[in-house]
Image (spheres, helix red, strand yellow):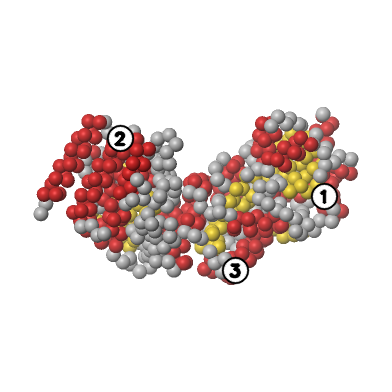
Amino acid sequence: MTLSDVELQLKAIALRRGMLRLIVHAGAGHIGGGLSCMDILNVLYNRVLQVSPETFAEPEHDRYVQSKGHCVEALYAVLADRGFFPSSDLNTVCRYQSPYVGHPTRHIPGIEMNTGALGHGLPICVGMALAGKREGAAYRVFTLLGDGELAEGSNWEAALAAAHYQLDNLTAILDHNSLQITGPTREVMSHEPLADKWRAFGWSVRTVNGHDYAELTRALSDPPAPGQPTFVLANTVKGKGVSFMENLASWHHRVPSEAELTAALTELAAAERRLRATP
Amino acid sequence: MFSPAAQAMAERLGLTLGRANVDEFAATLEQLGRTDPNLLVVTSDSRGSGKLAPFGQALPRQLVEVGIAEQNLVGITAGLAACGKKPFGVSPSCFLTARALEQIKNDVCYSDVPAVLVGLSAGVSYGALGTTHHSLHDLAVLRAIHNLAIIVPADNLETREAVRFAAAAARPVFLRLGKAPLFDLHAPGTRFAAGQAITLRDGGEVALIATGETVIHALLAAARLAERGLAARVLSLHTIKPLDTEAVLKAGRECRAVITVEEHLVHGGLGEACAAVLLQAGVSKPFRIVGIPDEETVTGSQADIFRHYGVSMEGLSELAVSLFTVA
C-alpha cells in the first residue's frame, strides 16, 4: 500500500484531529510538539519504517524510539492508525489503570522502549544500531529528538559513539520547532548552529522542511552516507495545523477548551476541503 | 585486610585465599562469552578496572567501548539488550550508580530489558582515593528502583554463580563487585541460588547477617565468639533484592540478637532492609547495623576503613558480646 503525498496529507489531518480529541478527552497531553512532529511520524510509519503489527516481534524490523516521549499522543494516533491497537483504546489514555500512560511504554504494541525522561533515546538507539551492525542485520534505527532535550549531555555522548562506530544504520531526527516549555530555545539555552555541530560530531546532516512530505521522504529513505549516522534537521512549526496554536510555547502542554477544540477541528476540516479540492 | 589474629583464625578455619571477585567475574564472563556470541561487554574506559582486557582480546567483536560516558554506557547497554543481545554494562559502581541512575531506572528497569549492570570496585574498594570513588549509596538507590535483582557476592564461588545467573536472567540484574582477593567461603559444589541466603555457620545466640566482602569478617567473628562460648549464626545474604525474608525472619526468631554487616552506608542498605522485615513481622531482638556511618569517610585503604568502623573480626565479636552484656 503506497500512499501519495496528498493521501498522506489527508491522513495527517485525520491524525491531528484524532490527537486533539484524544488530548481533550484525556485532559492532558503535549499538543504543540505533537502537532509539530505529526508529519514526521506519518512519513516514518507510512513510508519508511519496515515494521507492522505483524512484524513487530521479529528481530529484523526497523526500530523507532521516541526520545521526546512527552509527545506520545501523536505516536498513539499513528500507531492506532497503523493497526497496532484499536483506536478505541485511546479513550483510556491517562485514565486509572490504563496501559496508555502519558509517555511511551512497552506495554503498548508498537512501542520499543519506555521513554519520557529526555536525553535517553539516542544512547538507546546507538545500542540498537550497534546490535544490528554486530549481527549484520539489515534493520534501521530511528529516534526523534526535541529542541529542548539537546541540552542533555547524554545526547552528545551518544553522538560521539554513533560516529565512532560508523552507525550508518542510525538516523536521529530533530523536531526543530525552536520552542521549548519556557520559550524559544535560543533564549533558554541556545544550541545553534545545529547542522555544523552535528557535522563536527561526524554525522551526515540533512536539513528539510519537516512538514514537506517529499523532502521528509527523501531525507528518511535515501541511502545514508557510508559509515556515517544521519541527522535529519527537520524544521517544523510547533502547533502546526491549528493557526492559534502555531509557534506558541504556551501550547506546549495546554489542553484546549471545548470551544478551542471546535475551532481547531473547524480549521482542520477547512484544510481537508482545500486539499481535496486540489487537482 | 586482616589483623594477625584474624589471619590466624582464618588459617585455623582452614580457609584458603582465592582471587578477587572481579577476576573471577572476568574469567567467568570470558568462558560464557566463548559459547554465546550474543554475550557482550560494554565498558566506559573501564576494561582495566573490570579485568576485561583478556576478554576484549579473545572476543573483540563482543566488547563495546563507550569511553568515559556512563549515561551512554547504560543507554547503549539497554539498546543492545532490547535487540536480542545479552550485554553486561561494566563500570565503577561509584560512577555507574550515581551518574547513570536515571538510565538504570528508565532504560533498563522500567523498560524491562535483560541487561546486566556490574558495579566495579564497589563500596570502599578504592580506599584512599576518597569519597568520589566510594559507592556507599548504591544499594540504597538501587533498592528503591523496581525490577532490579541486586547481588553482592562474598567470594569467588558466589561471583561465578551470580555471573551465570545474570547471564541467563530475562530481567535486569545488578552485580556489585570488589577488587580485594577473598577467602573462599564455600566448599566446591555449594548450591547458590539468587534470592536465597547461604548459611555459613549455624548458631542460636547471635545472627551475623552479612553481604559481600564483609561476610568473611562475620565468619571470623563467629569463630572467635565460639571460643567464648557464644554460638553465632552467619548468613551470606548475597542477594539484597529480592531479599531472602524467610532466612532473615528465621534468624531473627531463633537467635537472641541480630547484627547486620555491609560495606555501605548504614542507611538504605542490607541493615535497614532486614530491620524492616523483622519489625513488620513483630520480631524485636537486640539489633545493630554495622556499616559505614553517615559521616565523611575516614581516609585509608579498604582494610583501614573496615577496621576503623568495626567491620572486622575484633569489632564484630566485641559488638556481639556487648549486646549480651547490656542485655
Q: Mark 1 points at which residue?
A: B6
Q: Mark 1 lies on which chain?
A: B
Q: Name the residue under label 3.
A: B34
Looking at the image, which residue is at 87% across and 43% down? B226
Side (left or right) of A45 relative to B216: left
Residue type, label 2: Val
Looking at the image, which residue is at 59% across and 68% down? B35
| Label 1: few (<14), some (14–19) or many (≥20) C-alpha neighbours in 10 Å | many
The residue tagged with tag 2: helix, strand or loop?
A: helix
Looking at the image, which residue is at 74% across and 34% down? B287
Q: Which of A175 and A151 is in front in this view?
A: A175
Q: Which chain carries label 3?
A: B
Q: In this view, does B181 lie above or below B288?
A: below
As measured in the structure, the alpha-carbon distance from the residue carrying label 2 to the one carrying label 3 is 55 Å
Q: Position of residue A173 (x, y in %)?
A: 33, 54
- Extreme-bottom residue of the structure: B58
